[in-house]
Image (tube, helix red, strand yellow):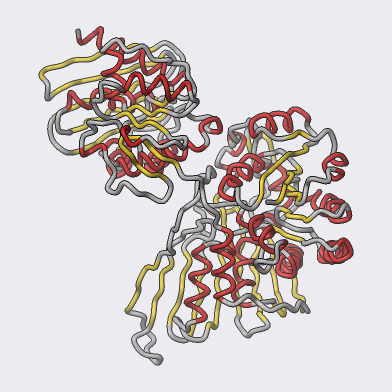
Amino acid sequence: MLNVAILGCGYMAYYYAMAAFNHRALFAIRGAYDISPERSDRWANHFQARAYSSFEALLADPGIDIVVNLTPPQQHFDANLRILRAGKHLYSEKPLALTRTQAGILRQAAAEADVLLGAAPSCLLSPSVALAAQLLEQGAIGRPRFLHLSMHDFRIDLAHPENWINPLGAGWPYANEFETGCTAEHSAYSLSIALAWFGPVASIDSIVRTAIPDKHVAGVRQPSAAPDFTTSVLDFACGVTAHLTCGIVCDQADRTIAVHGDQGSLLLEDCWDYFSPLRLTRRSSPDDGHAPRSETLRPERGVGFIHDYGMAMDQCMGIANLCQAIGGHSPLLCGGELAIHAAELSERISRGGGARLDAAFAPPSAAALTAASRAAQGTPPAVTWLLERGAPPQARPAAAEQADFRLLDSAERPNAPACLYGCGDDPSLPQGLRAAMAARLPVYLLPDRFDRLLRDGVRLELESPWLKSGLPGTYDAGAGDALRKLLPPAQLQSLDLEWRVAEPSRRLADALALCGWLADWPDAPFELSAKTADKDSIQLEVRWRDGPRVAVRLRGGDAIQARAVLRGAAAFPLPEALLAGVLRPDPTSALRQLSWLARLPRHRAAWRPSHSRQFAAMLASLHAIAD
């Protein structure tokens, strides 16, 4: 195992440390340094690592093998050079350097120190990119002729980036993003994939523009020294021609990569999604100008991986590849000549105009890329969930064995640490709860089970960080995240939901959990009212002082519909699919999300200990009204 230290504890340092849990067999992050002692101390305390007092102290630590540079792009070259000259292997966030000259100096420094030079992004190791390489090499679309690379992010200046703050309180550096420019910041995603498929670029012609010079964030005009839109034509040495367009001026993001050949085309839908679908379209005959046959292919997910970045992206796959290369077990794909050439292309594109290039390296074969991808995916630590006896069929997942958790009955309790999933009617559960929390093992109780225990007079440690309850019992992480983005708690004014479900009275605790979850569990006082016509018709309403109003009507049947109002906006309907993903039974999705939380219970800020206490208070108020 190799030891890693992080330079720069800003926005991305949290997500790198989270993704590192996928690769415990290869490396461990031991410490970090930041120019802000407060920031480095907060990061180090959170991840139980060392906070170095200075950059020099980090470089002088003989126990550190790799330094990961997460500083702003303008600082990359100087910091990277110091890391290499200190005899440490380097993994740099993109860009590796801002100029071709700087990249060449880094190449020489790495050679002189006999260390490896790694660099982001790691997306070229994604299962989707590896699958595409196999299809291209097999001739699925014939001879590749043209490549379209789109690296457009949405209008960042209109998306309130001042509110993008990681769980440790570090904000996203949007001002630096505008100053550095979208090409230097983002082009490497598309370029690295293209270079891995087709090798070096022989010539380039580029046009640059600043389409929106008057960007404002939080009422403050932002620097616009760098272009916010570039478009380029690249001629690869292998004969493929490419068009790369990069910007932050569009209303919607477009991160597609399309390869067009003599017999069809291959589209990667999103290069940021490491499991992105591929759309393969083939002509019925070589001389047929139409393409009637199209199919969607998906890469094998394998074990999956932990990520906390809003998308299926593992920033540490590149570090894993570097570790494999250091040990001689894999070629270095995230770094080396490919990363140096990507930095050169980024500089050329940002300057505009044309140039001929002389880079020379061989792209990896599809087999080598696939092997490196699989070796870098890592294996998340498995979690064994102990399922309470008496759990109803709808509370059990479709299969007991999943990629990242294993489900057992409580009678089969293994010696290894596990987590308790309370959803049945086992009378010995309270004793198991106390034993699990005393052993610092997470316990999850479905809202209905939590409610029944409280009504039976069972005393629960409501402030314990190991007690998890208060989320909708069938919480699907993907649908939940999408619903929270559609209904930001700080902007939600009201929500009226009608939920038709079998046995409405049994889902009352779930409905109450949904109310609190949508309101982000504010600590402000709340008012709760409930009306019960009969067991098949229940109306529930929760109002928070200076906060939202959430009303739920439970009736018999099978349908979900809702209308919401955000502050200053008109009412609008919510997609039923999102609501169904949160409320309809899907224990497999729920357990996968809960297993993620169980692996890293102290790293998830969104599920605070106060949630269980607040949920218990809401349940008590509800029963006081009903009784």
View extreme (front): residue: 415
Residue 44 at what x, y percent from top left? 70, 33
Please say if 468 is above or below 32.
Answer: above
Which residue is located at x 51 percent, y 86 percent? 143
| Residue situated in front as seen by the camera: 368 or 622 | 368
Q: Please, is residue 87 above or below residue 365 in the view?
A: above
Q: Nearer the viewer, residue 343 or 109?
A: 109
Task: State whether residue 482 is above or below residue 163.
Answer: below
Horizontal side of 62 relative to 232 (left or right) equals right
Question: Is 242 displayed left or right of 463 in the figure?
Answer: right
- Tell me: residue 264, above or below residue 447: below
Residue visible at 12% across and 31% down in the picture: 556
Which residue occupies 50% across, 60% down? 270
* Quadrant occupied by the C terminus: top left
- Left or right position of 386 against 84: left
Q: Residue at x 52, y 36 (%)?
A: 600
Q: Is residue 268 left or right of residue 232?
A: left
- Where is residue 249 shown, x and y percent of the image? 58, 53
Report which quarter residue 50 is drawn in.
top right
Q: Which of the 4 quarters of the picture holds residue 586?
A: top left
Q: Position of residue 221 (x, y in %)?
A: 69, 39
All told, the count of numbered labels is 0
Quadrant position of residue 577:
top left
